[in-house]
Amino acid sequence: MDHSTRLLARSQFEQVRLPVGLVGDLNAALEPEQVWQAALSGVGNVVGIDGVRIAELTMGSKLSYRVLAQSPDGPDLSAPLMRSPHDHPIIAHYAATRFSGWVSLNDLLPGRQWLEHPLYREVYRPAGVDAQISCAIQDSGATMLSLSLTRSSRDFSHHERENLRHLQWLMAITCRRVLQLQRERIATEALERAFSDSGLTLVLSPVDGRIIYASSILAAWSQSHPGVLDQLLQSVRTGRMSQPVQFGDTAWKAWTVSSRHGTVVTLSNGPTYRLTPRETQVLRALADGLTAHAIARQLGRRDATIRKHLEHIYLKLGVNDRLGAVNLARAEHLITEPPATTTR
């Protein structure tokens, strides 16, 4: 029995009829965007709604609200929520209680209390929305992903909420699986682009710069030497990688390579450049005095591709320009000088 069938069987066992298509789409999702799309297209088959919205709420000294996806044909309520999220009763309730279950506007402001609320009069009534119910589908502490359903009719019934409770469970386990896959994929792709085989390696998220992978040696070191990872991250964030980082009895230098997949931070106690064959070829042409455009023509590549190679070369060598790269490459014997020719 595959994962999708097990989810469906469990739902049927609990006498909840979740649509087979929605269960299958969520099970097949490999990216967060695929989860959002499955929800937008399938939640309407669970309960009657006019709109679906998935949003991210970031906690801190100030609440920050960001819409990740919403029904294209449903009411767009995002602008006032992003501008003043704390004015929304459900958001304010979650921030105060961290209750993650389904909560409707009518639960918090029954009867005319909601109808007389400024948000209803100024935003919801003009948009034709009378009822909304929301829940958390992922809560990391610092951020929460919410699923919100709206419609222009009655509040959500007890029977509908039973179905929604199991929808929340299904969405939550799907989000957890997909986000874990995303973290593993980012770490793998970033490591594949790393330029050092040192056992002291970190991978930082391309989104928020947090650590998504630490080699076992570095993780063990951080346990016995509290603060070393903070010292390393501070060096990276302030651009002071040239200053050595003390691990044990050895001073190590941090090297970084950044791409859209993340930033790989590697420690080495000696120069470890690990240029790819193509980067070495570009560096050799650079030493011959060729411009980026001339190198692109010579290698049959686009100018933008060569510029990206040069960017990676400068990062790996820890230099800022062509002259610095060529001088270091010659000093470290990364490229060889052509043999001198003699004339008779």
Image (tube, rainbow, N blue to C red):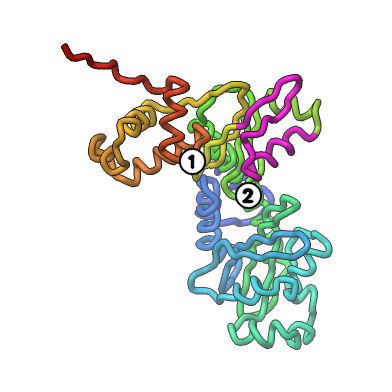
Is 160 part of what is drawn in magenta? Answer: no
Which residue position is annotated with label 1?
320
Coordinates of residue 232 in the picture (x, y in percent): 69, 36
Q: In this view, does 6 lie above or below 70?
A: above
Q: Which residue lies furthest to the top in this view?
A: 344
Q: Which of 245 and 182 is in front in this view?
A: 245
Q: In this view, does 26 lie above or below 123?
A: above
Q: What amino acid type should be assigned to the residue bearing mark 2?
A: Asp
Q: Residue at x 67, y 55 (%)?
A: 137
Q: Residue at x 40, y 42 (%)?
A: 308
Q: In screen coordinates, is 81 left or right of 197? A: right
Q: What amino acid type should be assigned to the residue bearing mark 1?
A: Asn
Q: Which residue lies furthest to the right in this view?
A: 97
Classed neighbour count for the residue bearing mark 1: other residues with Cα under 10 Å, few (<14), some (14–19), many (≥20)? few
Which residue position is annotated with label 2?
208
Q: Which residue lies furthest to the left in this view?
A: 344
Q: In screen coordinates, is 272 left or right of 310? A: right
